[in-house]
Image (cartoon, rainbow, N blue to C red):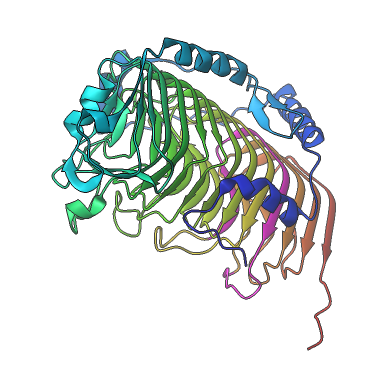
């Protein structure tokens, strides 16, 4: 069975996915198929759910009032188109603009310095906070950081700044032992006015969670307690960076404040035009990479694994490898991987916030995550809940779920390759799911389409070796039923239960071209 270590090179993910699929998927054609399926979802009207008037809790009313002045109305736009170059690399159409801004950043740099020349010592003991502050100054600078372990109490980056190390594991920037729990190790200088043109490359960021001792919770509140936080940043690049044991997140691309103004509202001051590339992260208290109320974010060739879950109550850790969270829009994930997390990729929102929308996943490898791909808008699932105003448009092509498992992170959560709840206009195209034939899945389904999901298309789904699981694909009925679901071109191999199960009450479902077979056992 495939195992991905903490320092896995995610640049290998495309080749691994090719091997798992049994051959290279013609990517341009597959993306065109996904786009055509998505258009079919949006061309047909979705019958609205029966109106509900769920009573809002007092605490939610107070939050809504407090955050509303900092919010704007969420308007759904068209997802950015993915472009494939001659080498098979995938980028969103807006990356050309980001490339021009990178050239502008290089043109605006007036100094190139080495932090050692300002008194920094990479001995793992010296407090280098003042040296970094002097080297960075007011920006327009490239600050080189050589090999060594540089202790700091936090680094703030003004606009027009590059922070460049000698590589992962060579340049290590580590939080001081007396740094407060809420410290962000690296962040932009002004979360309220915002910053722009920030570049971080080639280093390990050690949040030094050990300094806290055996505390019950490793994070404070909001977007604090992370290795790298971009809050209200326009034009940013993070390349070749490793994040180690943060109290909250490894990498957080976010607005000034997490916003809870209610479904249908997004925070002002979100980040935009950010590229995260070739990142590693592990030991995170909540999520590896996360986005909040931000847009036009590209996350590519990155690997997140082995969260501690210590930002949550023990046994209830919603710790995801990559989480596209509240109010995020126009996010593209390309050839990333996750391992041993609660969720591999989770697209979601809290009940009192807008859902992530217009998210595209192009190539993702999930290994031993509890729920490889989990799409949901919390608090908008049941027939008695208010229907989500914002949970729309998730497109995924070329996915793999390898042996999802039970996890101590969230003890009551059953393993799944995919869960879709409350979202509309969801396309999953070319998805390979490989189970462990000896693992006890306790009769649970591998894919669950449920809780008022609508306009869901599954195409080219290949499942194998889920011998102790339930249905390969289960479409849930009842009062909270999913509906308007199409399942086609499914192959189920060496699995004991039926490939597709439709629970009574689903009114609009189409199933086409399903093949089930068992390979003969090899003679010993």
Is residue 436 one of those drawn in magenta? yes
Identify the magenta region: 415-442
Q: Position of residue 426 (x, y in %)?
A: 65, 35
Residue 4, relative to residue 479: is it above or below?
Answer: below
Tally of marks: 0
Q: Residue at x 71, y 53 (%)?
A: 432
Q: Residue furthest left?
A: 178
Q: Quadrant of residue 259?
A: top left
Q: Position of residue 5 (x, y in %)?
A: 50, 59
- Residue 468 pos. (x, y %): 64, 72
- Residue placed most toward the observer, 97 or 141: 141
Seen as rendered, the residue at the extreme front is 117
For residue 170, above or below residue 188: below
Determine whether, in the image, residue 262 is placed left or right of residue 413. left
403 or 480: which is nearer to us?
Answer: 403
In this rendering, the answer to whether 348 lies above or below 72 is: below
């Amino acid at each position: 069975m495939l195992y991905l270590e903490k320092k896995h090179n995610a640049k290998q993910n495309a080749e691994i996915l090719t091997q798992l699929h049994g051959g290279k998927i013609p990517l341009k054609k597959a993306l065109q198929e996904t786009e055509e399926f998505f258009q079919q979802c949006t061309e047909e009207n979705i019958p609205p759910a029966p109106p509900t008037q769920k009573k809002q809790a007092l605490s939610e009313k107070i939050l809504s009032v407090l955050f509303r002045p900092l919010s704007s109305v969420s308007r759904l736009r068209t997802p950015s188109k993915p472009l494939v170059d001659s080498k098979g690399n995938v980028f969103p159409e807006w990356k050309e603009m980001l490339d021009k801004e990178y050239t502008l950043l290089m043109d605006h740099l007036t100094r190139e310095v080495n932090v050692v020349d300002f008194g920094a010592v990479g001995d793992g003991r010296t407090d280098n906070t003042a040296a970094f502050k002097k080297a960075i100054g007011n920006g327009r600078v490239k600050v080189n950081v050589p090999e060594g372990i540089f202790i700091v109490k936090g680094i703030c980056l003004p606009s027009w700044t590059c922070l460049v190390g000698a590589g992962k594991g060579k340049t290590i920037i580590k939080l001081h032992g007396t740094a407060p729990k809420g410290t962000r190790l690296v962040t932009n200088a002004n979360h309220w006015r915002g910053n722009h043109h920030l570049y971080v490359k080639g280093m390990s960021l050690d949040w030094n969670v050990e300094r806290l001792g055996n505390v019950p919770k490793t994070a404070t509140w909001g977007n604090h307690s992370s290795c790298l936080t971009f809050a209200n940043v326009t034009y940013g690049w993070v390349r070749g960076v490793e994040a180690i044991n943060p109290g909250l997140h490894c990498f957080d691309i976010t607005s000034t404040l997490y916003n809870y103004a209610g479904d249908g509202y997004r925070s002002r001051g979100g980040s935009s035009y950010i590229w995260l590339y070739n990142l590693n992260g592990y030991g995170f208290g909540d999520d590896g990479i996360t986005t909040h109320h931000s847009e036009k974010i590209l996350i590519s060739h990155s690997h997140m694994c082995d969260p501690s879950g210590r930002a949550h109550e023990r046994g209830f850790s919603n710790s995801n490898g990559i989480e596209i969270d509240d109010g995020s829009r126009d996010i593209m994930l390309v050839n990333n991987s996750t391992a041993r997390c609660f969720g591999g990729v989770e697209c979601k929102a809290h009940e009192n916030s807008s859902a992530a929308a217009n998210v595209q996943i192009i190539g993702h490898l999930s290994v031993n995550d509890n729920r490889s791909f989990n799409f949901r808008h919390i608090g908008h699932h049941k027939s008695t809940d208010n229907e989500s105003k914002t949970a729309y448009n998730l497109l995924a092509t070329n996915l793999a779920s390898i042996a999802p498992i039970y996890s101590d992170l969230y003890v009551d959560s059953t393993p799944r390759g995919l869960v879709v709840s409350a979202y509309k206009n969801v396309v999953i195209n070319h998805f390979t799911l490989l189970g462990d034939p000896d693992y006890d899945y306790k009769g649970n389904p591998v894919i669950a389409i449920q809780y008022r999901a609508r306009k869901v298309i599954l195409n080219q789904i290949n499942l194998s070796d889920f011998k102790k699981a339930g249905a390969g694909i289960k479409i849930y009925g009842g009062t909270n039923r999913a509906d308007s679901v199409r399942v086609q071109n499914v192959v189920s191999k060496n699995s004991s239960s039926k490939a597709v199960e439709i629970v009574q009450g689903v009114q609009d479902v189409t199933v086409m071209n399903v093949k089930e077979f068992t390979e003969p056992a090899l003679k010993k």
